[in-house]
Amino acid sequence: MAVFRHRTLADREDLLGRLMLAPAMAYVLLLVGAPLVLALLLSFSAATAGSLSFSWVGLRNFATIVSDPQFHSALSNTVLFTVVSQALVVILATAGAFVLDAAFVGRRLVRFLILLPWAAPVSLAAMAWTWIFDSTFSVINWTLKVAGVLHGWFYWFGDPTLAKIAIIAVHVWRTFPFATVIVLAGRASIPRDISEAAVIDGAGFWRKLFQVEMPLLLPIVTVAVLFGVVFTSTDLGIVYLLTRGGPYNSTHVLASLAFQRGILGADLGQGAAIALFLLPVLIVVAAAMLRLARRTEVGT
Amino acid sequence: MAYVETRNLQKYFGDVRAVDGVDLAVAEGELIVLLGPSGCGKTTLMRMIAGLEQPTAGEIYIAGERVDEDIPPRARGIAMVFQSYALYPHKTAYDNIAFPLEALRRARSFIRDAVQKAAGMFGIGHLLGRRPRQLSGGERQRVALARAVVRSPRVFLFDEPLSNLDAKLRAVARFELKQFQRQLGTTTIYVTHDQVEAMGLGDRIAVMDRGKVRQVGSPQEVYENPADTFVATFLGSPPMNLVEWSGDTILGFRPENFLPKAVFATDDGVVSFRLRVREVEHLGASRLVYGMLEERVRTDQPVIADLPVTIRTPIAEGEVYDFAVARRALRHFDARTGLGQYDGAT
């Protein structure tokens, strides 16, 4: 075998490192960085879909949306959907991870099935959900009807509260698999000795869960929640495909409202301002959660 | 009546017989060591007593009560110290030690006093505010011991608790462990693969191999009168010399009993051998002499002699010398079964 007597590219870790990072950097800069800068510029302009002329209008777009009740409802919906769905996801994912950790026949199949929603294309899934929540053919309604539980009828997308519940349900369904897998991985990383020590020390199921396992899972659950918050609060697809913001614009979130105003309504400036509104909040959330995760990890 | 007892206890993992019919009786207040090579089933046996593994068959009794069927670990009155210590990393030393008492829902003031007392016992009272990662290995081990002691269990289970300590600390920790076990008088089952630890700590040693207990006895008994060739060679460093004697007997003698013939005052009660010396190792306090037996038995059988530094007989590699063993230091084993033959039991 030939021995390379000079440094090859593989020996030059500094150069190699940069080279291997380059595609990712290019991707982030072109597909995330550039649009972000563009959105920032647009949010301070009176640009419309018809003319991309940058006429500087300062904070006017922001002033307009802040005084817009529709924006307020979209903002509170975004927060509501995110907080409720992520709270449910944390509980369900933790429970799910415990179930999947237990040995039982068919565990592989169940694990696969649980992961499926994560892999399913959102449009396909939304079609299934529109059927589940259909005003005439809703399987939920028919099931409840046949079971004799439901006497009236749920018009899922006709009633603001029901529509919100439906949206949250789909968010939960969509984030749950990912969070479950993360928590499952986190559980596997807890040394078996520690769980066993808790058993021997006399801890019952709940004490072991809340005093030993949950605190050790906290860093990883935090990561799962961080991802969940970012995905849910910026999601356009679910609201748009299920309700299009209806009924009576009651289920708009920031992303769908931005899309409606900026693209459908052709007011690019206002759309950009709405879309950007959550950015500082998300940055703070991300920073706080990463800090928390790090603190728990280091254990200070 | 034994305090902890197993009857024909078995644990199979698939086809592997991890524990293969163990009858063990531990007296109240006794410290018994389960000693054996890794994979001999000693840890599995302990885990079954703890309730962390369900036996395939057999029975376990603690203080006369049968526990293997449906008494969970928390109700068995046991405390366990793990090899890794298994401290709760997110809790302070205080909260670690307090945990078993909190699980028992004891009053806060009771817990505070008990934790202080247990911590005082191991000299870690000043470390109670620290988390495990802020403690040294020896300190963690003490926290683990304090956590085990704090709720006054009926039985201590120790799973190689000293093996993560460095050699110097281990000797001290071993001494302290024995002291406090004596002081508390709590029945203790101690698992280790380290024979020095076993000999130093155990009131009795149960030597295990391939899922079975080969011999139970005091350290002196198992060392001097090994039940079979496995025990004979597992205990002692270097191990007992085993040489073919006659067709159906194996002769065993400890290296430290195999000395130059000149050392023995008379020929009475002495069996002598011709030894061709291949190598001599100087270990400071002793000399290890590696060689081959030349006559009397089948030739070319490797043996080791362990000469204390007080024996100054010059020994050169490649030469042949007269060596001897006192007759009372000779042990006989059945060549087929490997079992020891004692008191005319042949």
Image (cartoon, coloured by chain):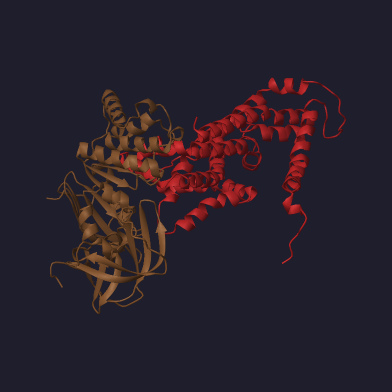
The one nearer the camera, B245 or A97, is B245
Q: Residue at x 26, y 25 (%)?
A: B110
In front of the other: B231 or B148: B231
Quadrant in which the N terminus of chain A appears? bottom right
* Residue at 60 percent of width and 37 percent of height: A232
Q: Where is A212 relative to B53, above or below?
A: above
B167 vs A189, left or right, is left
In percent of width and height, residue A277 lies at: 69, 27
Please name the residue shown 29% across and 67% down the image: B323
Residue B148 x/y as whole percent? 29, 38
Residue A266 visible here: no
| Quarter of the figure with residue B35 | bottom left
Is B247 left, or right, of B346 in this rendering?
Answer: right
User: How many numbered marks appear?
Assistant: 0
Looking at the image, residue B59 sits to the left or right of residue B133; the answer is: left
Q: Is residue B29 something that shows in the picture?
A: yes
Q: Is residue A33 above or below residue B191?
A: above
Q: What chain is colored red?
A: A
Left or right of residue A76, residue B25 in this image: left
Snapshot quadrant of residue B144: top left
Q: Which of A80 and B264 lies nearest the eye of the viewer?
A: B264
Q: Give residue B121's position: percent from left, percent from top.
A: 28, 31
> Which chain: brown?
B
Residue nearest the observer in this picture, A48 or B343:
B343
Query: In the image, is residue B226 above or below residue A24?
Result: below
Residue A254 locus on image (x, y percent): 66, 31
